Amino acid sequence: MPKMGAKLFALLILLSFLMIPCLSFTNEKKKSLGIMLREINKNGPYLGLITVYSAEEDAFFAAAHFKNYSRYPYVDLSGRRFRVGKVEGKKVIYLRCGVGMVNAAAATQQMVDLFDVYGLIHFGVSGNTNSSLSIGDVIIPKEFANTGLWDWLKPNATVSSTIVAKLDVENYNMPKGGNNSLGRIANRPEQFYSEAGVPNTFQQKVWFQVTSKWLQLATTLQGMQLEQCVNSSICLDDMPKVVVGLKGCTANIFLDNGAYRDFLFQTFGVSSSDMESTAVLMTSLSNDFPIIVFRGLSDLAGGQNGTNVIDLFQSLASSNVAKVVLQFIKLLSAHSHFQS
């Protein structure tokens, strides 16, 4: 065997011996995870709770009497921590999914694939796109749309018949008149695949509805007393309220622009704008799981004069939405026929 060939052969043999412990470790880890999940799921089914980021999580755990499952209090998967326990007497799997639609969809799919859940509650804060609502309000929408699925076209380009809305950038020129090379934005419908549909065949959908029985139950939450003050010196002018049955939208965009805020409200009739809800909702419905969404309004999404106030009011919005979610969990406990 030539000298170079002998060295290569020896290196391959060495690498094969080094890989055996790695493969063994991977297999052992998978085996241990499988045992843990079987043990957790034997105690199910669970209610899945999905929030987004730390401010919402902090408010939830400050308000909830979360009792960890003593043997396996959590499972770490793909960098996320799935917490196992009880809230208001209900067995729950709690997860903070992370910001954005990819994080939201991936985390939701993991939850329904790996844990014995019978339904999902998604909650967090959002921008307010409806001038009749106020910061601090908690909305429980009946449906959501992904308004970030775009065709970005040339000025005066022909719009496909499947497009559900369009925004001509030149309409926002200052001063008025003239062309704008940014052209037009055309909103597409989603391609929705589901357990109930024909395999490998999508349905074009714009709006995704939450579970009607759960929304019906949530109507009893209207009139709840919510927090009005961040602290002793910062309070809202109006007492926040719970509003059920409006529309919301989602996109991978933090919205802080008054003109686009108005476009969304006038075109789609939405009252909130966030970065996760439609993804969680769509993934849950695709897998045929009941779901409801709660969002606390933390800012005016660009409708304000001056700086966005999310940093000032996100803690209040997070606390209010956590309070409403916990009350809904109590209702589910008292109305077991609503759990499916």
Image: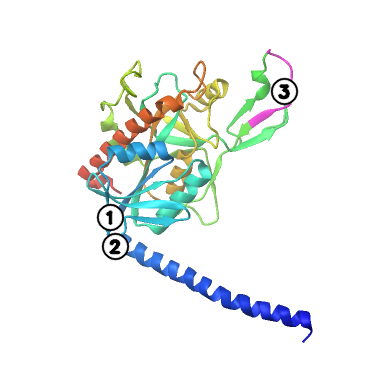
| Residue at the image point whose x is 67% and y is 17% from the top | 173
| Residue at the image point whose x is 62% and y is 75% from the top | 15
Above or below, 230 relative to 275: above
- Kindly report the distance in space between the C-alpha atoms of the residues bearing marks 1 and 3: 58 Å
Q: Nearer the viewer, residue 44 or 263?
A: 44
Q: Earlier in the sequence, mark 2 or mark 3?
A: 2
Q: Nearer the viewer, residue 161 or 41?
A: 41
| Residue hosting label 3 | 180
| Residue hosting label 2 | 42
Magenta-drawn segment: 175-185
- Kindly report the distance in space between the C-alpha atoms of the residues bearing marks 2 and 1: 12 Å
Q: Which residue is most to the bottom?
A: 1
What type is the residue that disc 3 sits on?
A: Asn
| Residue hosting label 1 | 69
Q: Where residue 229 sits: x, y (%)?
A: 32, 22
Mark 2 and mark 3 residues within 8 Å of each other at the beta carbon: no
Q: Secondary structure at mark 3?
A: loop
